[in-house]
């Protein structure tokens, strides 16, 4: 099986869907001729032509607005916002149009659009190239929010997103485009070419959007994490020198559909939780997880949620 970086896996997903479905189109700033700022779409315009893969003006509102119209008329657009930090001018199109179209039309119309956004810090991008706005999307009814943590999931989830009839916000953590960041800034990143999750099939496959994955079974603590923090929590378990190696159960919530739904469904028998995120505290996705966890008592045992010490990484 070939080894791929997350960039190559995402490109492969779009390649597969462009070939399978003539209604799929890919567009955004510099995604055509240059292949995107991170080269995720490199070579696709040459292969499929300028009517299937094309560049747009610097207008995030226009990019998403066009995608909404395309989706309403039966196409399956994959729009790229060059950095997640830039999505704010498209907020109205995403929240008031894309997310509401199915309900407002009583099911007569859907909005099968996928909006890709590189997100997060760790690449010296500065203030306007490092934001993590996923919580804003998970609080909007009608939007699906997806954050992959590895190349295999990235490809399968992106294909699932493109095939889904709902609008999907597909956030790509830049810090792990080329390898899993484990929290050690002073050590080189292990490339995906040497990692088991870098093995990605060349053809078509899907990963369900409504799913989570147990990375390590345990009985004492459940660590809920997604994107790069899944790898930080796993490394912490390996280095703890305590029973955490056997007890820690990080849920790779890289597969998030709605606030906390999938991770909660998979938690069994562990009543103490550590939620690790890489986003702001006050409106972070952790609040959605807590809103589900705190009122519950599993088999009469109170749920305890620890404070997240690592959200600034």
Image: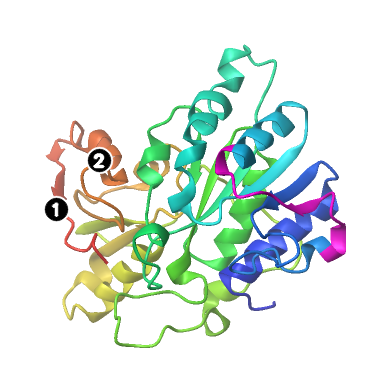
Position of the C terminus by quadrant: bottom left
Residue shown at 71%/32% (left/top)?
A: 71
Tell me if residue 86 can be seen.
Answer: yes
State the image coordinates of residue 204 (x, y, percent, origin top left).
75, 57
Query: Of the residues under marks 1 and 2, which one precedes in the sequence?
Result: 2
What SS does tag 1 mark? strand
Does the magenta-highlighted stretch encompass residue 51? Answer: yes
> How many C-alpha atoms fall within 10 Å of the one at disc 1: few (<14), some, or many (≥20)?
few
Q: Is residue 195 left or right of residue 30?
A: left
From the viewer's perspective, is residue 226 above or below residue 232? above
State the image coordinates of residue 48 (x, y, percent, origin top left).
86, 58
From the viewer's perspective, is residue 9 above or below residue 138? below
Residue shown at 54%/85% (left/top)?
A: 194
Q: Nearer the viewer, mark 1 or mark 2?
A: 2
Q: Is residue 299 left or right of residue 27?
A: left
Most extreme residue toward the bottom is 187
From the viewer's perspective, is residue 265 above or below residue 223? above
Residue shown at 21%/58% (left/top)?
A: 221
What SS does tag 2 mark? helix
Which portion, as a residue range, is magenta? 46-61
Q: Which circle marks residue 124 in the picture?
A: none
Q: CA distance from mark 1 to mark 2?
A: 12 Å
Q: State the residue position of label 1.
A: 306
Does the magenta-highlighted stretch encompass residue 111? Answer: no
Q: Nearer the viewer, residue 185 or 96?
A: 96
Most extreme residue toward the top is 106
Q: State the residue position of label 2.
A: 287
State the image coordinates of residue 110 (x, y, percent, origin top left).
66, 25
Residue shown at 57%/75% (left/top)?
A: 198
- Please tell me in which quadrant of the rendered image residue 121 appears: bottom left
State the image coordinates of residue 134 (x, y, percent, origin top left).
40, 46
């Amino acid at each position: 099986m070939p080894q791929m970086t997350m960039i190559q896996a995402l490109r492969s997903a779009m390649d597969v869907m462009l070939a399978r479905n003539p209604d799929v189109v890919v567009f955004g700033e510099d995604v055509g001729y240059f292949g995107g700022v991170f080269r995720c779409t490199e070579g696709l315009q040459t292969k499929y032509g300028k009517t299937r893969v094309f560049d747009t003006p610097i207008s995030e509102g226009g990019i998403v607005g066009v995608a909404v119209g395309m989706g309403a008329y039966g196409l399956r657009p994959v729009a790229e916002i060059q950095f997640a930090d830039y999505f704010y001018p498209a907020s109205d199109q995403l929240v008031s149009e894309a997310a509401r179209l199915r309900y407002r039309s009583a099911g007569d119309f859907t909005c099968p659009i996928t909006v890709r956004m590189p997100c997060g810090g760790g690449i010296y991008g500065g203030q306007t190239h490092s934001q993590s706005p996923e919580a804003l999307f998970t609080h909007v009814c009608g939007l699906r929010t997806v954050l992959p943590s590895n190349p295999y999931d990235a490809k399968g989830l992106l294909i699932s997103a493109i095939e889904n009839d709902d609008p999907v916000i597909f956030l790509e953590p830049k810090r792990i485009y080329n390898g899993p960041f484990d929290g050690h800034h002073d050590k080189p990143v292990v490339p995906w070419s040497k990692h088991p999750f870098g093995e990605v099939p060349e053809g078509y496959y899907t990963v369900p959007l409504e799913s989570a994955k147990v990375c390590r079974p345990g009985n004492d603590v459940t660590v809920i994490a997604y994107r790069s923090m899944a790898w930080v929590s796993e490394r912490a378990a390996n280095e703890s020198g305590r029973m955490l190696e056997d007890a820690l159960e990080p849920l790779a919530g890289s597969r998030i559909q709605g606030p906390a739904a999938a991770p909660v469904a998979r938690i069994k028998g562990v009543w103490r939780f550590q939620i690790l995120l890489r986003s702001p505290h006050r409106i972070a996705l952790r609040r959605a997880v807590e809103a589900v966890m705190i009122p519950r008592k599993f088999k009469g045992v109170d749920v305890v949620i620890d404070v997240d010490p690592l959200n600034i990484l």
